[in-house]
Amino acid sequence: MEPMPQIPMLSYDVVVIGGGPAGMAAAVKAKELGLNVLLLDENDYLGGILPQCIHPGFGLHYFKEELTGPEFASRLARRMVELGVEYRTSSRVLEIRNYSDLEKVVIFTSPAGVYQAWAKAIIYAAGARERHAFEIGIVGDRVAGIYTAGEAQTLMDVYGILPGKEIVIVGSGDVGLIMARRFALEGAKVKAVVELMPYPGGLARNVMILKDFNIPLYLSHKVVEVRGRGRVQRVKVVKVDENFNEVPGSEFWIEADTLVISAGLVPSVKKLKKIGVEIDPATGGPIVNDRLETSVPGIFVAGNSLLINDLVDYVAEQGELAAEAAKEFIDKGGIESRNWVKVEKGENVRLIAPHYLSGDRDVHLYLRVARPMEDVEVRVPEIGKRLRLPVVKPAEMIRLKLKAEEIQKAGEKLTVEVVGA
Amino acid sequence: MKTRVAIIGAGISGASIARVLSRYENLEVHLIEKAPDVGWGVSKANTALIHGGYDDDPEKYPVRARLCIRGNRIWHQWVKELQIAHVWNGALIVATKEEDFDELEKLLERGRKNGVPEMRIVEGDELFHLEPGLTKEAIGALWVPIVGQIAPIPAVIALVENAVANGVKTHLETEVTGIKVENGEVKGVETNNGFIEADIVINAAGLYADKIARMAGIDYFEIHPRKGEYYLFDDDVPGPRRVLFPTPTPVSKGIVVTTEVSGHMMIGPNAQDLPPEEKEDFATTEEGLREVWEGARKLWPNLPPKSKVIRTFAGLRPEPTGGDFIIKAEEEVQGFINVAGIRSPGLTSAPAIAYEVAEIIQRDLGVKLVEKERWNPYRKEITHFFMLPPEKANEMVKRNPAYGKIVCRCNHVSEGDILEAIERMKFIGVKTPSVDSVKFRTKATTGTCQGSFCRPRIVQLLAREYGVEPWKITLKGRGSEIGIGDVKALLRGDEA
Ligand SMILES: Cc1cc2nc3c(=O)[nH]c(=O)nc-3n(C[C@H](O)[C@H](O)[C@H](O)COP(=O)(O)OP(=O)(O)OC[C@H]3O[C@@H](n4cnc5c(N)ncnc54)[C@H](O)[C@@H]3O)c2cc1C
Ligand SMILES: Cc1cc2nc3c(=O)[nH]c(=O)nc-3n(C[C@H](O)[C@H](O)[C@H](O)COP(=O)(O)OP(=O)(O)OC[C@H]3O[C@@H](n4cnc5c(N)ncnc54)[C@H](O)[C@@H]3O)c2cc1C
């Protein structure tokens, strides 16, 4: 294929897109494996969303100690610098072109110019975006004072701006709960956390925040409307039944100047879709094999672009795996094609990745259940695998390790199900 | 001696009038707008169509019928002079029942009377060739190739920039509170920012044109709002190639399915009449949106899942007594011109309205208009980094590194684009910095994530360029500040 003569050309074994924990872990590993690697991130700094997460709770598995987001990020960044990994910040990937298996081009822009970076493999670790108010069907006035949790976090912890003083939070996942505490610590009044599901979405230790700060939690409720002139003045909350239908007559208004939406993340994969990467509607990320390779050979994916993770440790693990796979891909001129074992979702499994297993290596399957259950077994009937767990919740990702020998015992598919023990 | 003209309202009507009048040597034109920026009234939220002119009955609504087709023709020229984003993709008015053909024949007939070129009825293969995704229930359609779409607020901005470049003075955040009339002649307008003297006052105040008219003692019409709601989808949702209408009913043109100029599929509007006093009710409603969804599905059965909705919004049509545009010099108040009741198709008609006003000034007010020796018809569109091919983008960045830095991820809007937008805001006199002013000029915050990544960065740039604290930056003018203070404001006990 023809390079574009007018714009400067760079050349690497691997280009890593995204400088969050997934991308940094991938770049470190790739460098350790002797690959010539470039990491690109659009922010002015490395770390992805970690630098804005100033609370502790990161790294227990990966670094064996509890760190804050910025600490976790700076450890990986330091490792990159020690190894001499080439990286560029303020550099946004505009387009990926896939010319052939070992010829890919990443076009990116930066204050130094627009470049084309040729690579044999790409590791895509661009993270996720947050769902916003329109997406979850909130109607009413389009006014100031409506933020996603991440935006509110950025305003407060990166730019030092306090968004408001009377807060309603949509979503009781960890992010919503952490933001509830964050606002309370700055003296704002958190008037409610509103959760659609009949149970809280976050980890037990984060649900404790509500007690600590005396914050009302409305389960099986949703925010349906915002009213205000210029700025949020009140939000309408309504109860829902077990089918998530609104219960007539149950609505009430809460006076507040700020509505924080913490309604989940969506993998950022538009650039992959454009080049034909197949997407799993359940995870929102690409369909991958156990090398985290997408349906386009030589394009690997890790972190929240693969599926939404709740632990940064798993994200970093995926980054390393993607780097090892990229090494194999480059050395052998491709990941071997074979009769992959297909992973299928069984009872109470909402999503799972990777989707195809080779059987020649151990793998971690990442899965989420559709609804909470107590005293369960995660089972893979085809190979008689069982893992007993006291409790499972949609908000907590389950990591299931399968050994190569186990996978080899399977036929064409493996079904993963979560059932009462 | 120059004739001083005050135009009330910087919507598409007022802006078009300002531009047309900026051509004359002997006029001193003042454009007065209560909002912090131009185009934030009715012109902000609508279907953005340049209509075909076949719809309005010349017997019932002669002014609308005449100006719509004329406006359409002028827009074909103006979008080029002013570099306004547009697409001429044509419209299909779709029949799904045999009886619908009677209505289509009527429209065809009316269109011919109004002077609409190239219309015809299409059926069968040709119909689905023009629009492959159309409902299979469709049995025919009226094909109107001259229909197009523009970006409405950018159009107002373009007109005002060009008007200002040609000498028009703007007064933003200036609300007209009274009209001074002496001995049956206008003398000027009272505003919250003082008195503005004028020999001619043009009332182009949109929803409030009745209120302004009453300030001059004219009360033969009233304006009530008619709400229309919309869904806008993510840009990876495949939408139609043409503008799709259902066959109209006596009440409404119906719910449109279209792909708007920036590539997003859009559906809407419904039509809900509100009482005259509810002119600030821009809220979307569950019922209204449901109606839009159901209506759109009849033309486009393959609607995307709700998770692909990136925005819902509502606009208010200014519906006048009698239903026709009211464009005339009022005899009892010398120098007072009403441009009132500019409901749909007001966006389409705006250029024609503007020429009409110039004619009225000459003919009815007896001001002989003298053309400037040098009048600049051209205006250059702001740089859109996302539109540049890589080589061009690279050149741009080499000249100015700010263009290399992307601020809005979804739409690839660069810091350079945003700084240019801020410069242009200042050029037309925007005093209160707002994210929306940047949004309407650059498209930042309008993508998949709806600004959750880039808004904080835009706020920083606005704060720096306007020299104010970042929390004082507004979303859409005073009262919509981004924050209440610095992060310690409440703990310190500052009454924020
Ligand atoms: C509020 C909050 C609290 C959390 N708390 C915890 C916790 O307590 N413990 C824990 O373990 N985890 C926690 N997490 C989760 C953890 O932070 C994430 O799982 C992890 O950061 C995801 O990493 P990533 O590398 O996949 O994505 P990201 O960190 O999002 O990084 C992706 C990077 O890619 C960049 N990028 C995207 N597209 C492009 C492009 N085209 N060109 C260049 N660059 C691009 C992005 O700007 C970003 O810098 C929390 C998350 C949030 C939001
Ligand atoms: C739902 C809907 C769909 C539509 N679809 C189409 C379409 O597809 N095609 C089409 O051609 N037309 C369409 N229209 C109609 C079109 O949008 C309007 O006709 C047009 O925008 C009216 O422009 P305007 O300049 O007259 O009014 P506005 O844009 O409202 O401008 C009037 C301005 O006056 C200002 N103002 C008011 N009072 C004062 C005061 N006291 N002092 C100072 N300033 C004041 C306001 O702030 C405002 O900015 C639609 C309208 C709606 C609502």
Image (cartoon, rainbow, N blue to C red):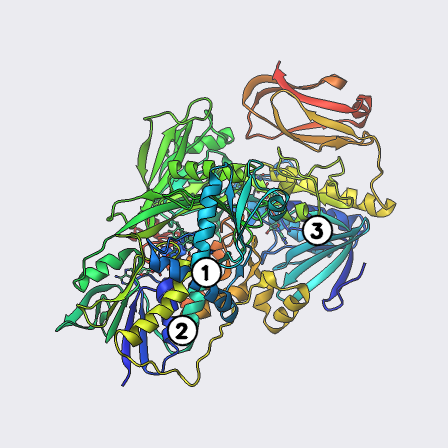
Type of amino acid under label 3: Val
How many neighbours does mark 3 have within 10 angstroms: few (below 14), some (14-19), or many (20 or more)? many
Secondary structure beneath label 3: strand
Image quarter for ligand 1 equals top right
In the rendered image, the residue lying farthest to the top is: A421
Residue A16 has which mark?
3
The residue that appears at 28% across and 71% down in the rendered structure is B6
In the rendered image, the residue lying farthest to the right is: A332
Q: Which residue is mark 1?
A: B115
> Closer to the camera, B378 or B184?
B184
Up/down of A412 relative to B109, above or below: above
How many neighbours does mark 1 have within 10 angstroms: few (below 14), some (14-19), or many (20 or more)? some
Badge 3 sits on which subunit? A
Up/down of A215 relative to A152, above or below: above
Q: Is mark 1 within 8 Å of ligand 2?
A: no
How many neighbours does mark 2 have within 10 angstroms: few (below 14), some (14-19), or many (20 or more)? many
Q: Which residue is mark 2?
A: B163
